[in-house]
Image (spheres, rainbow, N blue to C red):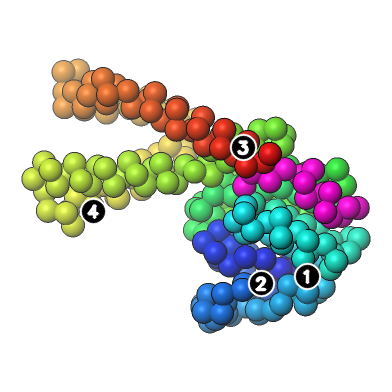
Amino acid sequence: MSTTIVGGGNMGEALLAGLGADVTVVEQNPSRAAYLKSRYDVSVASLEAAVASASTVFVVVKPYHFAALLDSLAPHVRPGQLIVSAVGGTPLARMEASLPDVAVVRTMPNLPVSVGLGTIAISGGTHAVAADLDRVRTMLAPLGRVIEVAETQLDAVTALSGGGPAYFALMAEAMIDAGVLAGLPRPLAEELVLTTAEGTGRMLGAPDADPAGLRAAVCSPGGTTIAAMRELEGRALRAAVMAAVVAARDRSIEMGR
């Protein structure tokens, strides 16, 4: 079955990298379109042509472009097609109002789908049956873990796993700067932080992994790490992270309105 990706930005490219062959891309920026065509050996076509030939259409654009795109997309969709949205903060009801009688599945992938280690939450619309959700799971399985959730949970998913790579990247950036402040050359600090992040991620990805247990295992009595933990707790790291995720969730809800 042929697939069209509408939108060739970072997330569109991440999906493209994982979905592989028989994909057509719709990208309005000529230089970006040329890059995607060269890099992934895919077809680049107009919206009308790409949608007409597709059995599944992934829509991966910025939320502020989505309303205009829906108006352009509506005349070209047909019964039997599956529309999969990866647009944050856009409810299924809004899409279905513009695309009546078409199966729509809303998804929230995060950027690690580009390396096959993503998390993708999915939620089906009014006309999406079990077979449609199974189809989406099958297509997205090579990109990471696919989890079905209620649409009411997608704003929180957007805040937590959608934004999660940015939160971890910020922490890594801060740790690299801390290493420099502590006297290490920046290249060495970068190597230490990034390899530590990779190893810790693998440990936390193991079955029955326990973040609190891992942290406790590193904190020897009276040692260096527990001293660092006291500083982080004293500066309200947990509260800051919680507030950030709730702020992102609230922004997603606001965008949906």
Could you tell me which residue is drawn at 59 percent across and 56 percent down? 62
Q: According to the image, label 2 marks what residue? A: 26
Q: Which mark is residue 209?
A: none
The reply to whether callout 3 and callout 2 are in contact (CB within 8 Å) is no
Looking at the image, is mark 2 or mark 1 earlier in the sequence? 2
- Few, some or many C-alpha atoms within 10 Å of disc 2 (few <14, some 14-19, many ≥20)? many
Q: Which mark is residue 254?
A: 3
Q: According to the image, label 1 marks what residue? A: 51
Between 21 and 186, the one lying in front of the other is: 186
Q: According to the image, label 4 marks what residue? A: 191
- Few, some or many C-alpha atoms within 10 Å of disc 1 (few <14, some 14-19, many ≥20)? many
Q: Is residue 162 visible?
A: yes
Q: Is residue 223 above or below residue 67?
A: above
- The quadrant of the rendering that contains the N terminus is bottom right
Q: Secondary structure at mark 4?
A: helix
Residue 192 appears at what percent x and percent y?
A: 23, 48
Q: Is residue 1 visible?
A: no
